[in-house]
């Protein structure tokens, strides 16, 4: 019985590393802080903590909630370290911070056995990361055109 339980946890953790790594690959390809290793390790760590919590606490919902709360809060501090305020009042690193935070949640989902949900969230995250920037630039151009049309010539 224990061997089957260990095998299940091993699979969950492998998937957590893979899914976290997918987001990390995207961040690495766009030359953003926190790449493959960081995302994969955050996902792995979150998955391990929640999987072991399930084994040790015998799936106690309150224990699960406390571990999840601690992880998400702690990872928030890690993500905050990625945020940089530039001298021109611009802020950088928000998407990287959010992706780290989300990767912890993905690891939690994998560790808890919700691999299908975690995979779906990764797909959604990659869509948002890849389409969000172009969509924001398009919206900015549309707003600028509207402002130009409204301004007196």
Image (tube, rainbow, N blue to C red):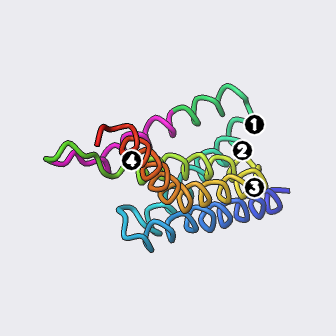
Asked if the residue at tag 2 contacts the one at tag 3, i.e. Cβ–Cβ closer than 8 Å, the answer is: no
Q: Which residue is mark 3?
A: 115
**What separation in Å lies between label 3 and label 2 (alpha carbons)?**
17 Å
In magenta, the rendered stretch is 70-86
**Circle nearer the N terminus (4, 2):** 2
Residue at far top of view:
62
- Residue 118 lies left or right of residue 82; in this view the side is right
Up-down relation of residue 90 to residue 137 (above or below): above
Q: Image point 59% across, 65% down: which residue?
A: 17
Cα separation, mark 1 vs mark 3, equals 20 Å
Q: Are marks 1 and 3 in contact (CB under 8 Å)?
A: no
- Report x, y in % for residue 15: 68, 64
Q: Earlier in the sequence, mark 3 or mark 2?
A: 2
To which residue does mark 1 refer?
58
Q: Which residue is mark 4?
A: 144
How crowded is the residue under tag 4: few (<14 C-alpha within 10 Å), some, or many (20+)? few
| Residue at image location 49% in from the left, 61% down from the top | 39
Percent across and percent down for residue 64 are 66, 34
The residue singled out by tag 2 in the image is 55
Separation of marks 4 and 1 at Cα, in angstroms:
57 Å
1 relative to 122 in the view: left or right: right
């Amino acid at each position: 019985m224990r061997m089957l339980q260990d095998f299940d946890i091993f699979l969950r953790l492998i998937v957590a590393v893979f899914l976290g790594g997918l987001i990390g690959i995207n961040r690495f390809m766009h030359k953003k802080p926190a790449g493959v290793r960081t995302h994969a390790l955050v996902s792995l760590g979150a998955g391990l903590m929640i999987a072991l919590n399930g084994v040790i606490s015998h799936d106690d919902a309150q224990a699960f909630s406390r571990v999840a709360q601690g992880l998400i809060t702690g990872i928030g501090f890690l993500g905050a370290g990625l945020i940089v305020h530039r001298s021109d009042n611009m802020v950088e690193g928000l998407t990287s911070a959010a992706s780290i935070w989300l990767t912890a949640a993905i690891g939690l989902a994998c560790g808890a056995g919700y691999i299908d949900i975690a995979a779906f969230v990764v797909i959604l995250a990659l869509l948002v990361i890849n389409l969000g920037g172009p969509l924001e630039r398009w919206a900015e151009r549309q707003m600028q055109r509207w402002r130009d049309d409204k301004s007196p010539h």
